[in-house]
Amino acid sequence: MSMQPRLVEVRQKVLRQNDLLARELRERFREAGVAVVSLVSSPGSGKTTFLEKTLANLRLRHRVAALVGDLATENDAARLARSQAPVKQIITGTVCHLDAQMIGNALEGWDLRNLDLLFIENVGNLVCPSSYDLGENLRLVLFSVTEGEDKPLKYPTIFNTADVAVITKVDLSAAVEFDLEAAENSIQSVRPGMPTFRVSAKTGEGMDECMQFLESAVAGSRGDAGEDAVVTASSPGTKA
Amino acid sequence: MHELSIALSIVEMACGEAESRGGVKIDAVHLQLGQLSGVVKEALLFSYDLACEGTRLEGSRLVIEEIAPVAYCPACRTQRALDSTGRLCCSVCGGLTPEILKGKELEVVALEISDEHATASGRG
């Protein structure tokens, strides 16, 4: 009765829907003149502390806000809100990553024209967030000195999708015998040319350089520069 | 472990294709999966059967073609296979290769359709 199976060509990206939504978001951000920076890392590498200090610093000169994703609790939003910047928690339930739809929903009621810089803190996870474009201009991947120098080699995909690497908790590097050079070599082998910062949000070490980099990203995005120009125009002297 | 949500997206897309072709029966979905896509083949295959349950794709197969990473080597000025996914280096000269040409695919490329009869009686 039924015919021989036949093969029909389709060619559709599985995450096409997310990509379309992300493109719409990126266009909205561009029109509103807001630069968007997302943060990814494993749980416990210091995203929230880094962001807390970043918001407190940048809000003196820019209009900043943050969205923060977690499986449960509003603890991180409460911590970030101490910076006085507008903050919204996205609770994902069982979902291990943020997607473009969640960002769109979370932004409801926010007038983006009142912002210069929006941070998106992803769920702590070095695997799944790599597949989902959130419409951001810059993706920062963080990893702490307690995690081991070869973290980028173990999670190449997320490092490869990121634009900037931030090595955190460098005040502990001597205590845990962390080899910063080896870590930077790992980063360069999975993402050649990626700008890298060494920071301690606790002591403030390296934070100024990182803030300057983010501020030039804001300037690039609020000018007429396209999204790519944000990255290239401000390609930093990391710590050369 | 986001393979389940990826599998759900695949099933949703394939169901949409089946409907738009007049409710044909889909025996298999062919997927290209890059080794740098961040999606694990085994986990995706496991999730696929779960995602198909209760849909018109129940009992169908997911056929995965893995795509090895290929990059442009600026030193050799040509495309090169990579040594591994953990080091984006040219397999010939060992130079760094930032520009990935292949290996990030996550794309449904074809559907195996067995029941053409439904096409004729469908909305077309």
Image (spheres, coloured by chain):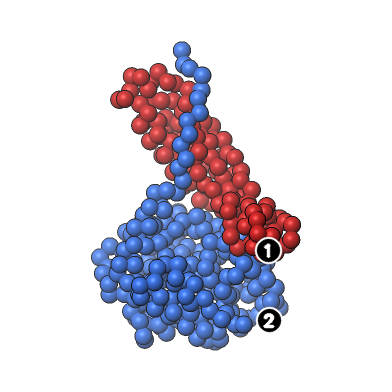
* Residue A154, position as x, y percentages in the image: 65, 60
- Which of B61/B115 is in front? B115
Q: Residue at x 31, y 25 (%)?
A: B124
Disc number for residue A175: 2
Asked if the residue at tag 2 contacts the one at tag 1, i.e. Cβ–Cβ closer than 8 Å, the answer is: no
Q: Residue at x 40, y 68 (%)?
A: A226
* Residue A96, position as x, y percentages in the image: 48, 56
- Which of B53/A142 is in front? A142
Q: Determine the secondary structure under disc 2.
A: loop
Q: Residue at x 41, y 53 (%)?
A: A19
* Residue A192, position as x, y percentages in the image: 62, 67
- Disc 2 marks a residue whose amino acid type is Ala
- Which of A33/B94 is in front? B94
- Disc 1 marks a residue whose amino acid type is Ala
Instruction: Check disc 1 and report the residue beneath it.
Output: B75
Identify the image quadrant of residue A76: bottom left
> Which chain, by letter, is red?
B
> Which chain, by letter, is blue?
A
Q: Quadrant of the C terminus of chain A?
A: bottom right
Judging from the image, mark 2 belongs to the subunit labelled A
Disc number for residue A136: none
Q: Determine the secondary structure under disc 1.
A: loop
**From the viewer's perspective, is the residue at label 1 or at label 2 nearer?**
1
Judging from the image, mark 1 belongs to the subunit labelled B
